[in-house]
């Protein structure tokens, strides 16, 4: 099923559901970690599961002669395989993330062909972050510089237009496309208005819905949704929430994701004596956010798990209720 249909059904039924994202396990780790996470959250009827994509890391290792040697590694490969395994095992819709960084258009096309053959018809189209050590995002030769170009390529494939015009048997794909939006502005955007203009370009290019970057103050989301509407963006906007779990996230999250932590949350976290206390505070804060978003009528709330989902289980239990065998929620 397409994610946009799941969203439209939730809107029609006035039933807010949740989705969550999983990270592929670290290289060498087992897929069972992923399965255990899903099995904890399955009783709460997740709408779908996102699987993140991780670009290669660049490491410089000092050689005995003092020169630096460049090493390229990918610590979390396996997005496509994990997505397929989840769908086959649980029958839950999956949304693999696809990024521009490191991919030529030909490689992107191959990844999309793989997804299509695996019966995966949902993707989140992203640019990806700047590679460590680079000042600004650089596409590989014949790659995309912005997510909008990736959206256009996917739409072309949905119209049966592949890169290789000599392909004899043309089967159009049928991908539903999500894109990223930033309630507190993307870090590289000159101002919030231009960021929304670029977001509208992605929607005009064919994106079906938007998922937001995490935010800790719902007013930022409501304001963003209003500004999107004023700019003519009519697709559903799915809010993204990240329950805080460790004290160092107070500075790390603003640094990495360019989001503000509201003063009451920051004060409460700073007063914690250990991370177990932070986890409790962060979970309670996210429950408060989710309850308010649910009341406001959002169809789906997306949770960033960062690999650990016990807090999402607590939130799901409280906000979304357990689904019994008959499909009734408690
Ligand atoms: P874009 O839409 O290309 O925007 C990037 C910047 O360029 C913005 O400042 C925008 O205003 C500007 N811009 C856009 N279009 C144009 C244009 N045509 N001309 C000039 N400027 C333009 N990263 C990963 O590596 N893997 C993941 O799995 C992943 N998952 C994510 C999931 C969500 C829900 C979100 C919100 C982010 C995720 N990211 C992920 C991070 C994302 O890749 C970064 O935030 C990245 O820096 C921007 O991606 P984007 O798709 O928003 O890029």
Image: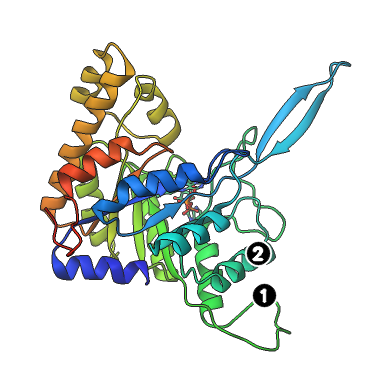
Classify residue 78 as left or right of residue 72: left
Q: Considering only vertical position in the picture, is 90 above or below 219?
A: below
Q: Considering only vertical position in the picture, is 306 above or below 139?
A: above
Quadrant for the N terminus in the image: bottom left
Extreme-right residue of the structure: 65
Per the image, the residue denoted by label 1 is: 163
Question: What residue do we see at 70% from left, 84% from top?
Answer: 167
- Which type of secondary structure does the marked residue at label 1 adopt? loop
Q: Position of residue 227 (x, y in %)?
A: 25, 54
- The one nearer the camera, 124 or 33, is 33
Q: Position of residue 126 (x, y in %)?
A: 49, 54
- The one nearer the camera, 125 or 312, is 312
Q: Residues within 10 Å of mark 2 (few under 14, many from 20)?
A: some
Q: Tell whether label 1 touches label 2 (CB within 8 Å).
A: yes
Q: Position of residue 190 (x, y in %)?
A: 43, 43
Extreme-bottom residue of the structure: 168
| Residue 65 found in image quarter | top right
| Residue 197 found in image quarter | bottom left
Q: Is residue 23 visible?
A: no
Q: Position of residue 161 (x, y in %)?
A: 60, 81
Where residue 105 is drawn, which disc sits there? 2
Where residue 201 is drawn, which disc sits there? none
| Residue 87 found in image quarter | bottom left
Classify residue 220 as left or right of residue 62: left
State how many labels appear.
2
């Amino acid at each position: 099923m397409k994610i946009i249909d799941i969203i439209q059904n939730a809107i029609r039924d006035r039933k807010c559901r949740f989705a969550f994202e999983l990270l592929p396990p670290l290289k060498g780790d087992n897929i069972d970690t992923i399965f255990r996470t899903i099995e904890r959250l399955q009783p709460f009827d997740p709408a779908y599961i996102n699987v993140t994509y991780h670009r290669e890391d660049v490491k410089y290792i000092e050689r005995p002669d003092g020169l630096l040697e460049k090493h390229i590694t990918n610590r979390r490969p396996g997005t496509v395989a994990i997505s397929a395994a989840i769908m086959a095992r649980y029958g839950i819709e999956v949304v693999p993330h696809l990024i521009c960084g490191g991919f030529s258009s030909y490689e992107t096309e191959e990844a999309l062909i793989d997804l299509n053959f695996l019966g995966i018809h949902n993707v989140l189209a992203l640019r990806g972050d700047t590679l460590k050590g680079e000042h600004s995002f650089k596409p590989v030769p014949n790659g995309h510089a912005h997510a909008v170009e990736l959206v256009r390529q996917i739409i072309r494939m949905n119209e049966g237009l592949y890169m290789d015009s000599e392909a004899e048997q043309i089967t159009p794909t049928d991908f539903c496309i999500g894109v990223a939006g930033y309630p507190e502005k993307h870090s590289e955007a000159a101002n919030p208005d231009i960021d929304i203009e670029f977001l509208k370009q992605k929607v005009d290019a064919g994106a079906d819905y938007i998922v937001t970057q995490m935010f800790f103050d719902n007013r930022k989301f409501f304001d963003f949704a209003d500004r999107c509407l004023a700019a003519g963006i009519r697709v559903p906007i799915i809010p993204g929430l990240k329950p805080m779990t460790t004290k160092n996230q107070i500075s790390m999250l603003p640094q990495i994701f360019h989001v503000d932590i509201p003063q009451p949350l920051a004060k409460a976290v700073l007063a914690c004596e250990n991370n177990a206390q932070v986890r409790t505070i962060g979970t309670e804060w996210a429950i408060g956010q989710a309850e308010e978003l649910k009341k406001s009528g959002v169809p789906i709330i997306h949770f960033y798990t960062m690999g650990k989902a016990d807090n999402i289980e607590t939130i799901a239990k409280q906000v979304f209720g357990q689904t019994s065998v008959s499909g009734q929620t408690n």
